[in-house]
Amino acid sequence: MPRQRSARSAALGVTVRRIPTTPISQRSAGALRRRLIVGALVVLALVLITFSFRSSEGGSVNSIQSAGAAALRPFAVGVNRIAQPFRDGYNWTESLFHARSEAARLRAENERLRQIAIQNQFAKQENAYLKRQLHYVSGRSFPRDYAYVSAAVIGRPSTAFAQAIIVDAGSSRGVRLNDPVITPDGLVGLVTRVTSGSARVQLLTDQEAAASAIDVRTRASGIVRHARGTRETLVLDRVRKEDVVHAGDSIVTAGWRANGLGSVYPKGIPIGDVTSVGQSDTDFFQQVQVDPYVDFGALDAVLVLVPKTRASTSP
Amino acid sequence: MTVISALRALAVAFVAALLQAGVISSTLVFGGAADLLLVVVVALGLLRGSVAGAVLGFVGGLVIDVVTLDTLGVTSLVLTLAGFWAGRYAETTGRGRAFAPVLSVGVITVLAAIFGLFLHYMLGEPVSAHQALVTTLFPALVLNLLLAYPVFRLVRRLVGERVVAEPSREVELVV
């Protein structure tokens, strides 16, 4: 029975009355009922999981689930159809938001692919060049007394005063001062400065460069050097007037040796073709212009020739 | 809870489950999808109490499992506990608090994700904790929090709120 007691406050002089409250047993029953329901639901869910998980394809649980899915399918389809316009609207709006980032992504990808294509093109050219180089060094035209050090061009400090390249091979790979430098196309120049890891190569087009050369067909000799006023044209100087030189003749290094001295260039390295021959009454020598085989502006890799005698004695 | 309000609550859970299974779960925003059914179940639990929340969570989860042909009972179990917890929160400290829907949805979204991951793991299904708890949970959490208030107000409008008698005061002053 609920208590119906009254009390009088001594301090305030007012009547204080307790009102009926929920009995404890009733509250406990409510809590118990709640726990029972939730517990039953949890157990039911666990039972469902167990049966669903353990049932085989075509089992009773699957059949019930399939029947339930079939029964709910019209509702699902209806909801889907009702929601379709909203979903389309959302997708359209989303595509608008993504259009800018998509375009940026495609631009970046396009840029990346273009760079890859360029790199591939370079690799293809380099591959062809290296194949040609390999063919050259194993061929008969490669000077027999020399070994080679393959080097990549890593710098072109060419100025109005000097024509040179920097290669990535130095004294640590056996390169020394005055070593000739060639490509499969022909003579490039001469090593003029060496560090342990790199070397500076004076090109044949440099104003101070010169190489003794001969006409392959007529054996007319002279000195190939840079033609004044041009950048990549050579002249065969000191060719006597009685020597015969014709346009189209091939010029190669002479590789002379006399009294223990010799040219720094080995014999027979191609230099270029004669493009024009001229002479005047006042000059002692003919004026022979040579178009070099080597494209000095597009050097990527070169071969530094190292005498075999030195290569065998070096550490 | 009258029969009419119970049917309304059931209909709300049913429609939310169908929407969730058919539309919302496939509408990805930043790699995650909102869980409308979870938000609705939490709202129902807050409005109608723990028992109603648990029952409606069970029913809604069962609909999801049936429609999606998933393992029966997994979603039911998660949503039963979610609805019950939300209901208990409303029956105790959360009653009448303005932030109760958002707080409940936030906490229950995270707990449901962890519990769901645990259940699937226990069932031997291939699960990725990173996928479940990072990649999809954060967007889902944000979306659920955004949905919390509107859905709570809508559900309250549709099914009403359970009238809870004020707790009796122990002492009444009679002048």
Image (spheres, rainbow, N blue to C red):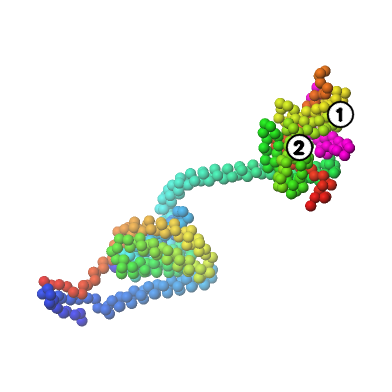
Q: Residue A269: where, in percent of width, then height?
A: 82, 37
Q: Amino acid under label 2?
A: Gly
The residue at 39%/69% (across/down) is: B81
Q: Chain of mark 1?
A: A
Q: Chain of mark 2?
A: A
Q: Residues within 10 Å of mark 2 (few under 14, many from 20)?
A: many
- The quarter of the picture where the N terminus of chain A appears is bottom left
Can residue B85 be seen? yes
Badge 1 is on which residue? A220
The residue at 39%/74% (across/down) is: A40
How many numbered discs?
A: 2
Q: Nearer the viewer, residue A222 or A29?
A: A222
Residue B42 has which mark? none
Q: Amino acid under label 1?
A: Ala
Q: Which residues are magenta?
A: A253-278
The residue at 44%/57% (across/down) is: B139
Instruction: Determine the secondary structure under disc 1.
Output: loop
- Mark 1 vs 2, N-terminal side: 2
Badge 2 is on which residue? A189
Q: Residues within 10 Å of mark 1 (few under 14, many from 20)?
A: some
